[in-house]
C-alpha cells in the first residue's frame, strides 16, 4: 500500500462521561487515553452536546453525541452543537429521526448507526443503511450480538451498500477487574490525526477493528489501493491479506458476496499472509474468531450479561477477535 503520507491512528469512537451516565469525567478519560497511548477519542454522551474541549497534546478529542431513543441509538460526530435540546427531547418516530439526522448532517456531522442488533437497546426504526454514514458493527467487548450485526452488515454489502464500519467500546465504567475503554479499538488509516482527517477516513471505509490496542490486526491490500477503495476488476486482480499476531487456534475467515471464501486456523501464534485471486465483482472483507474459554466467558458475564440477562451463562459460539472493513471490486 502506497501510504502517500497516510498512517494508522488508533482510538475509541464511542465513549461516555459523567456528562451523561459515564463513571469518569472528561479529564479522567483524557488521562486514561494518554496512559493507553491512544490517538483519538470521540465523546458521545447520551442526548447531550459536548462542551468546549481543551487542547491535549498527542490526543485528538472529537466532538460527538449519542442520540439515544427507544427507536435506536446513533452517534453524531464532528460537531459541538450537533442538534438542539428540543430535538433530543422530541425525536420518537422514524420520521423524527430523519428530520433530526438531516439537520445534524446540515451542521456537518457524521452519522453512525450504533449496535443495531443489541438485545438491550436495538435499532427499532427502519433499518436503512442509506440513512447513515457508518455502522458500529462491533459494540463493547466482543459478544454474541456483534455476530448478528456482522451478518447484517454482510447482507448490506451483498446488496451493494458500501457501508463503512467501526468498533466502539461504548465505555461507561469498569467492573471489578475489567478495563473496558479499549475493548475494542478502531484503527483509522488517515492523512493526519486531525478530527477532520480521522472522520473523513472513517466515512471512506479506511478502518480495521482490534480486540484491543496492539492485538491481532488485519490488513487487506491490492497494489496501491487503500482500504475502502473500489478496485477495477481485471483477469489478474488479487488481494493480499496480512494478519499480524494471529494467535494459536484463532481462525481467519475471508468473505466475499457468496459467503466464506477462505479460512485458516493458526497452529501457533505468528504473522500470517495469503494472496487470493478475485474473479468476480463484489467485495472482500475478513475477521478473526476465537473460541471463548472459561475466563473470557466469566468476563463476558460480568461485562455483558449483567446488562443482557438472557445471555448470562450462555454457551458462546466463536467470537470476533479482529475485524476488517471491505475492499470493493467492479468491472
Image (cartoon, rainbow, N blue to C red):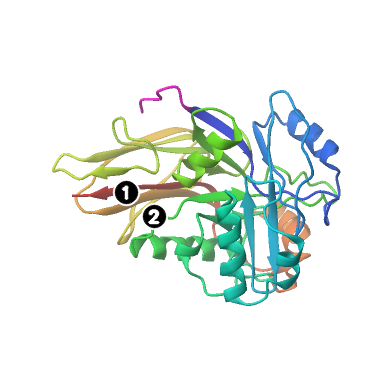
Q: Please provide percent x and percent y for residue 292.
A: 61, 54
Disc assigned to residue 307: none
Secondary-structure class at tag 2: loop
Is residue 172 covered in magenta? Answer: no
Above or below residue 123? Residue 16 is above
The residue indicated by pointer 2 is 162
Q: Please provide percent x and percent y for residue 173.
A: 82, 50
Q: Earlier in the sequence, mark 1 or mark 2?
A: 2
Is residue 2 covered in magenta? Answer: yes
Magenta residues, dominant SS class: loop
Q: Please provide percent x and percent y for residue 106.
A: 56, 54
The residue indicated by pointer 1 is 328
What's drawn in magenta, residue-wise?
1-6
Is residue 28 found left or right of 147 in the rendered image?
right
Is residue 126 found left or right of 298 in the rendered image?
left
Q: Are marks 1 and 2 in contact (CB under 8 Å)?
A: yes
Q: How many marks?
A: 2
Amino acid at each position: 500500500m502506497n501510504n502517500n503520507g497516510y498512517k494508522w491512528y488508533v482510538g475509541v469512537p464511542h465513549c461516555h462521561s459523567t456528562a451523561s451516565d459515564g463513571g469518569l469525567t472528561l479529564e479522567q478519560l483524557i488521562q486514561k487515553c494518554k496512559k493507553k497511548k491512544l490517538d483519538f477519542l470521540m465523546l458521545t454522551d447520551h442526548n447531550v452536546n459536548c462542551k468546549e474541549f481543551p487542547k491535549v497534546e498527542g490526543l485528538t478529542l472529537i466532538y460527538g453525541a449519542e442520540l439515544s431513543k427507544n427507536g435506536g441509538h446513533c452517534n453524531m460526530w464532528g460537531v459541538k452543537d450537533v442538534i438542539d435540546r428540543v430535538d433530543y427531547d422530541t425525536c420518537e418516530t422514524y420520521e423524527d429521526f430523519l428530520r433530526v439526522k438531516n439537520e445534524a448532517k446540515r451542521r456537518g456531522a457524521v452519522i453512525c448507526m450504533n449496535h443495531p442488533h443489541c438485545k438491550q437497546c436495538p435499532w427499532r426504526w427502519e433499518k436503512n443503511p442509506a440513512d447513515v454514514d457508518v455502522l458500529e458493527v462491533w459494540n463493547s467487548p466482543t459478544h454474541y450480538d456483534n455476530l448478528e450485526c456482522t451478518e447484517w452488515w454482510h447482507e448490506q454489502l451483498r446488496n451493494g451498500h458500501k457501508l463503512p464500519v467501526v468498533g466502539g467500546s461504548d465505555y461507561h465504567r469498569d467492573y471489578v477487574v475489567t478495563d473496558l475503554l479499549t475493548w475494542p479499538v478502531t484503527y483509522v488509516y488517515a492523512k493526519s490525526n486531525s478530527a477532520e482527517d480521522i472522520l473523513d477516513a472513517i466515512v471512506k471505509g479506511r478502518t480495521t477493528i482490534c480486540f484491543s490496542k496492539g492485538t491481532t490486526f488485519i490488513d487487506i491490500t491490492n497494489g496501491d489501493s487503500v482500504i475502502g477503495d473500489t478496485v477495477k476488476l481485471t483477469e489478474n486482480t488479487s488481494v493480499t491479506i496480512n494478519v499480524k499476531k494471529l494467535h494459536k487456534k484463532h481462525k481467519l475467515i475471508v468473505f466475499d458476496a457468496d459467503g466464506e471464501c477462505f479460512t485458516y486456523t493458526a497452529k501457533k501464534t505468528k504473522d500470517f499472509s495469503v494472496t487470493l485471486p478475485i474473479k468476480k465483482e463484489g467485495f472482500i472483507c475478513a475477521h478473526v474468531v476465537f473460541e471463548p474459554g472459561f475466563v473470557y466467558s466469566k468476563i463476558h458475564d460480568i461485562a455483558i450479561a449483567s446488562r443482557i440477562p438472557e445471555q448470562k451463562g450462555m454457551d458462546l459460539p466463536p467470537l470476533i477477535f479482529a475485524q476488517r472493513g471491505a475492499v470493493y471490486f467492479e468491472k
